[in-house]
Amino acid sequence: MSEDRLSRAAAAGVRARSLLEDDLLQGAFSALEERYLQAWRATAIDDVAARETLFKAIHVIGKVRIILAASSATAGWPNASCGS
């Protein structure tokens, strides 16, 4: 990786870590998950499509968290490559 790409990846990693530690964002994720779960529980027994949509929505939140966590792991790359 070039130094420029490493620097951009590190900056993105720092931003991702900041987002993961942001109480407002984490609260929004938790509120969404809870609303989706409540809506899922309230679906009619024959409303398979609604349950599947809500299931996917809940899992998207988890996937966003995983992507942010993976990006935050790159936060120290340039320092490691410079021997710092």
Image: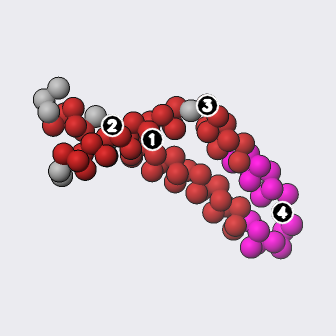
Q: Nearer the viewer, residue 80 or 66?
A: 80
Q: Nearer the viewer, residue 83 or 67?
A: 83
Q: Which residue is mark 4?
A: 43
Whether residue 73 can be seen here:
no
Q: Quick check: can you spot residue 76?
A: yes
Q: Secondary structure at mark 2?
A: loop
Q: State the residue at coordinates (45%, 50%).
A: 67
Front residue (pair 55, 63): 63
Residue 42 located within the stretch drawn in magenta: yes
Residue at 28% in and 34% down: 76
Q: Quadrant of residue 59?
A: bottom right
Q: Which residue is under mark 1?
A: 16
Span highlighted in magenta in the image: 33-51
Mark 4 or 1 closer to N-term?
1
- The earlier-in-sequence mark between 3 and 2 is 3
Select label 2 or label 4 by which is in front: 2
Residue at the disc numbered 3: 23
The label number, if any, that marks residue 75 in the structure image: 2
**SS type, badge 3:** helix
Q: Is residue 28 above or below residue 42?
A: above
Q: Earlier in the sequence, mark 3 or mark 4?
A: 3
Residue with the most extreme left position: 83
Disc 2 marks a residue whose amino acid type is: Ala
